[in-house]
Amino acid sequence: MKVHMKQLFAFSLILLSSALMAQTAETYAEKLGYPKGKKVLIIHVDDVGMSYESNQGAIKAIRNGVANSLSVMMPCGWVPGFVNYWKENKDLDAGLHLTMTSEWKDYRWAPLAGKPKVKGLVDPEGAMWRSVADVVKNASADEVETEIRAQLERARTMGFEPTHMDSHMGTLFATPEFMERYLKVGMQEKIPVMFPGGHNTSIKAEEKMIADQFEMTQTIGKQLWNAGLPVLDDLENTSYGWKGPENGDKSEKALQKYKTEKYINAIKNLKPGLTMVIMHCTIHTEVFPHVSDSWPTREGDYLAMIDPELKKYIEKEGIILTTWREAMQRRQKVK
């Protein structure tokens, strides 16, 4: 029994020392030259190019609100609509939302590499698989890399050079082999990739990360940094689960109040460092509910971004807003 207590005490000391180290270690935000102890946020809108509503939601969330970054689903139908806007507004921080799934029932898309090259990414309807699990079951890492490069190539063919890359539905994080290809393309092409490699306080809790997984994120974070890319200290990725008020009120006023409170609370709980806050913004139309039943959370995200209360909170707390473009520019200046 005494030995067992000693082991527990020793383990507690290890945990305590790890926690203290995490508190005192230099953040990636500090390495990039942001002030020590500050929360630095990339407020990021996913799923641009998926629909007209997604394009408008993202653009308005940035132009009229506090969002400051977005990423585009290159296989989707409304990509030209966004890229044409971007060509006249190149100040927008726009990346690639690398897409390996096509999840909706009545609105679907296929891989850009073409079925013969990536057969494992194609379902019986000729579209991408609906779920991450199906991609893992059927697609090879080579096919995933081929499709990543096809999506990057289409962007460049359209004259659109992305500021960063991330992963739709987290598919590229689903297996070590997929993730390796994602990171490889980013490092080879010198394009920042969404990867939390710092203290990871928020994402560690959300993903219930065990010690080995956390260590792996630290190793990859260092690898990306040494390859000349900026690295996130953390990732706040819970907003898609905020479905709306418990009383079922889906009015604009109720959705806005609910989502704004959620974002303020989430930001309040973040630790200092460079954190990407993920969301999905759409404006309201009669059509989008036929695309996806996720419309309340997406409209709520948009309404929260343009809510003066959220802007007021960010300013009052002295929170710094940045973009992937600025993070990369800062990284290039660090020796």
Image (spheres, rainbow, N blue to C red):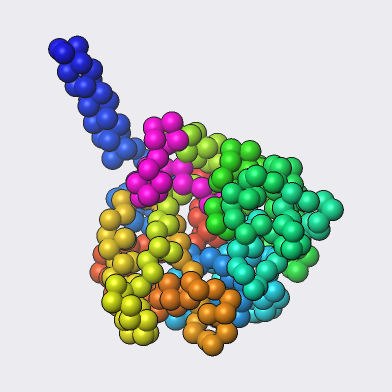
Residue 42 shows in the view:
no
Res 253 quadrant in image? bottom left
Work out whether 292 lies above or below 23.
Answer: below
Residue at image location 40% in from the left, 76% down from the top? 300
Quadrant housing the N terminus: top left
Residue 213 falls inside the magenta stretch: yes
Residue 169 falls inside the magenta stretch: no
Residue at image location 47% in from the left, 38% down from the top? 217
Residue at image location 32% in from the left, 61% down from the top? 267
**Looking at this view, is 87 or 310 the one in front?**
310
Work out whether 37 lies above or below 251.
Answer: above
Residue at image location 65% in from the left, 73% down from the top? 107
Residue 134 falls left or right of residue 60: right
Residue 325 shows in the view:
yes
Question: In the rendered structure, which segment of residues is drawn in magenta?
Answer: 193-214
- As drawn, the residue found furthest toward the left would be 2
State the image coordinates of residue 76 (x, y, percent, origin top left).
68, 69
Work out whether 164 lies above or below 244.
Answer: above
